[in-house]
Amino acid sequence: MAEYLIESEGVGERIDKFVSRKEGISREFAKKLIESGHITLNGERTKPSRKLRRGDIVSVTIPPPEPTELKPEEIPIRVLYQDDHLIVVDKPPGMPVHPGAGVRSGTLVNALLSLFPDLPGIGGVERPGIVHRLDKDTSGVMVVAKSDLAHQSLIEQFKSRKVEKRYLALICGVPKPRKFTIDMPIGRSIGDRKKFSVNAVNPKEAVTEVEVLEELAGGRYSLVEARPKTGRTHQIRVHLSHIGYPIVGDPVYGGGRRRAIKEAPTREIKEAMERVERQMLHARLLGFRHPATGEWMEFEAPMPRDMLDLLNLLRKS
């Protein structure tokens, strides 16, 4: 247990903010500790909003992490970087980020628990360390928090749109012009609650910058870079599909797989498109400020083999 005597430092400050700063934990976690009685003021329970006065004594007890039913699994995962505060990984396609309905194993979280046993308790029992996500079949760079300080900082950076995100996508057709911005709100689809759409219930702002990098197979396909400025679910997939250029292999939005097969100029490409089992979308780059040092950091992940092989085939046609 830690105790703090309030003299000059902290006077007039909310107790949750004071403890967050002194203990290096998130403010949300500090609030939960106050509400559960693990943080007391002058030996008594208090409210997170209580402002400190000279002579107050703040007592802090950090309980051990809650036990989790999630099992560590030795699943190969490429770690791009790690220190005391964060982990950066290259998530392979086909791997869910965290457990969900009917999924209790084989996730990125299961793999991380095997590599980093101290991860439970950071940000929640079911999603330890997770501050953002990629779709199951989208590959690429992800950052995971190892400390409450990092969890709080990274969530705030994503929320305030200070994170740089760049994706590569193989799409049907070639948009004109080569550089443009899609500014269309997104929300739950009116016709299908499992999907997202610009024709939505309570749509929220969604902005994606797009640049055509290569025209492929005589203009039937193209490789584009997408830079989402907001973080809506399925944003890139929904935006590109809505303007008529679905991602190759996308099983949900715009008939990307059907159209990709129909557009194939050769038998070899048609057979390759028939074998595609996921959307060809890859999180190539992620940039953010280190939660502890403030240093700007950028990480890149190479295109996965299935996407690279398809791209090279299209380049030759």
Image (spheres, helix red, strand yellow):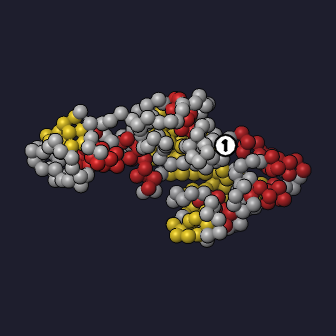
The x and y percentages for residue 210 are 62, 60
Report whether 170 appears left or right of 15. right
Above or below: residue 264 compared with residue 32: below
Asked where in the image residue 300 lies, by quadrant, the reply is top right
Identify residue type, mark 1: Gly
Asked where in the image residue 110 lies, by quadrant, the reply is top right
- Residue furthest right in the image: 267
Report whether 22 appears left or right of 216. left
Of 105 and 5, which appears nearest the observer? 105
Of 39 and 265, which appears nearest the observer? 39
| Residue 194 is at least partly visible in this image | yes
Above or below: residue 315 compared with residue 176: above
Of 97 and 194, which appears nearest the observer? 194
Above or below: residue 83 compared with residue 250: above
The residue shown at (54%, 59%) is 232
| Residue 289 is at least partly visible in this image | no
Query: Which residue is disc 1 drawn over?
Result: 94
The residue shown at (70%, 58%) is 252
The x and y percentages for residue 117 are 47, 29
Query: Neighbour class for label 1 at 10 Å: few (<14), some, many (≥20)?
Result: some
**Quadrant placement of the N terminus:** top left
The x and y percentages for residue 80 are 54, 35
The residue shown at (43%, 31%) is 118
The x and y percentages for residue 231 are 52, 57
